[in-house]
Image (cartoon, grey):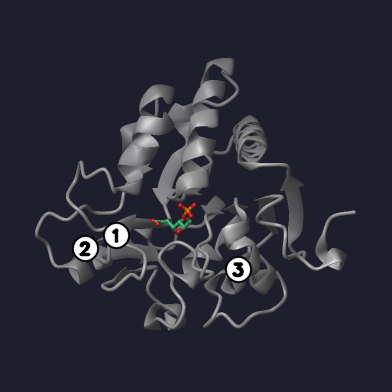
Amino acid sequence: MTGPEILIETDASALAEVVADQLVSTLSALQSQGTTPSIVLTGGTIAEKIHEEVARRASDGRVDWSNVEIWWGDERYVPAGDPDRNEGQARVAFLDGVGVDETKVHPMPADDGTDLDAAAARFAAEVGTRTFDLVMLGLGPDGHVASLFPGKPTLAETERTAVAEHDSPKPPPRRITMTFPVLNRGREVWFLVSGSGKADAVARALTGSPVEQTPASGVHGSEQTLWMLDEGAASALPDELRPS
Ligand SMILES: O=C(O)[C@H](O)[C@@H](O)[C@H](O)[C@H](O)COP(=O)(O)O
């Protein structure tokens, strides 16, 4: 496992285009090797821009979207169809337009009245021992990734692949999240971060801040970790970490 690689683009639009291009290239290359790629999507605003850029590239035919396994790193535990769901946002932004195979799309459970912990356990069983070719993660200003938040007991989870978060500091409060053990099964992990509001969290994560304070510090790809930033998100990086 090599150290994190950092890419810096001028702004959110440029970042979204670069990430979408790299996602298409990565998936196309895996499929040309005969692999059915498995990717983990994230929620959030830069993710939304990226998804829209992916939709714009669908007509180039480089990716057979019916042959991609699609997962999410976290989900808000709200009823199906609620606009807060990461799954619904991704479907509207690109999934519904690229010809996915629904048997390969693995949304986390929606709130159907089932107990949250039971729903998380059901999803954890679906993940099982799977590994992923690519895990994409947004970053909160507090350094959270997925729905793994500073100071929470979920950061210490070493067995279960997904757990419930009952009291997210980022609304809505009830969520399901993949845990460090499974996020770190990603061959590649891409952190997708835009805006000066995230700059301190980016700098903390890349300069060894403890996981308890900056959960992003706890996630590394088994082969590669890529920080894909815009200038705002990179603005607190020590000079020595900025790509030359
Ligand atoms: O469900 C969620 O809220 C996301 O998965 C979360 O982890 C998000 O990626 C970060 O909070 C960044 O979100 P923004 O890009 O909107 O700041």
Q: Amino acid at mark 3?
A: Ala
Q: Which mark is residue 215?
A: none
- Residue 175 is drawn in which quadrant? bottom left
Location of mark 2 (residue): 119
Please tell me which residue is depicted at 72% across the width and 65% down the height of the picture: 236
Location of mark 3 (residue): 201
Please tell me which residue is depicted at 59% across the width and 61% down the height of the picture: 198
Is ligand 1 less than 8 Å from the beta carbon at label 2?
Answer: no
Location of mark 1 (residue): 123
- Residue 213 is drawn in which quadrant? bottom right
Residue 68 location, x and y as percent?
A: 47, 36
Residue 87 location, x and y as percent?
A: 33, 44
Element at label 3: helix
Q: Are marks 2 and 1 in contact (CB under 8 Å)?
A: yes
Q: Quadrant of the C terminus?
A: bottom right
- Residue sticking out furthest to the left: 113
Choose the circle earlier in sequence order: 2 or 3.
2
